[in-house]
Amino acid sequence: MAISKVAVSQDAHRLMLAIGEAIRLHTSQSPMSGEQIVGVLGFCSGAAIVRAANTRNDRRQMREMAVANVDLGIQAMTSSMANTSLIIPDGVM
């Protein structure tokens, strides 16, 4: 398994939008801080890694992939792409 970034496939894009919408809907009824949202997403990533990886090495590589994608998300949100879609709702921080 090679470390990779999230594929910009239509399925991946729809999932990102769905996660963003679920967060928006949830936080409109139950406000959460940005730190809480990031913590929940990190926990969910860890749980997904355990389900998807069969060996310790696979878990390590998937964890590195997750970190690489966190960095990609930070870059995307601080670049000109920041206006395309926002996962964390405005005003949460």
Image (cartoon, rainbow, N blue to C red):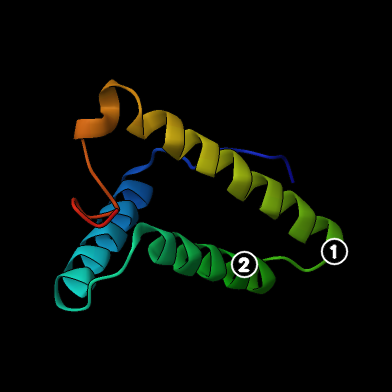
Between circles 1 and 2, the one closer to the viewer is 2
Residue highlighted by disc 2? 46
Give the mark nearer the N terminus: 1 vs 2.
Answer: 2
- Residue at mark 1 to residue at mark 2: CA–CA distance: 13 Å
Q: Amino acid at mark 1?
A: Arg
| Three-letter amino acid code of the residue under disc 2 | Gly
Residue at image location 59% in from the left, 49% down from the top: 66
- Tell me if mark 2 has few (under 14), some (14-19) or many (20+) residues whose alpha carbon lies within 10 angstroms of its own: some
Instruction: Report the residue that reaches farthest toward the bottom.
Output: 30
Where does the image place residue 17, in percent across and percent down from the top left? 25, 54
Disc sitting over residue 25 in the figure: none
10 Å crowding of disc 1: few (<14), some (14-19), many (20+) = few
* Secondary structure at numbered mark 1: helix
The foreground one among 45 and 51 is 45
Looking at the image, the residue that sits furthest to the right is 56
The quadrant where residue 26 appears = bottom left
In this rendering, position of residue 9 left or right of residue 81 = right
The image shows residue 69 at horizontal and vertical percentages of 53, 42
Q: Secondary structure at mark 2?
A: helix
x 49%, y 65%: residue: 39
Q: Quadrant of residue 60?
A: bottom right
Residue appearing at x 49%, y 42% in the figure = 6
Q: Which quadrant of the structure image shows residue 8?
A: top left
Q: Which residue is denoted by mark 1 in the rendering? A: 56
Q: Is residue 62 above or below residue 33?
A: above
* Residue drawn where x is 22% and y is 70% of the image: 27
Q: Residue furthest top?
A: 80
Q: Position of residue 24 (x, y in %)?
A: 20, 63
Judge from the rendering whether residue 10 lies leftward or rightward of residue 21; answer left or right.
right
Q: Is residue 74 above or below residue 39?
A: above
Q: Position of residue 41 (x, y in %)?
A: 46, 64
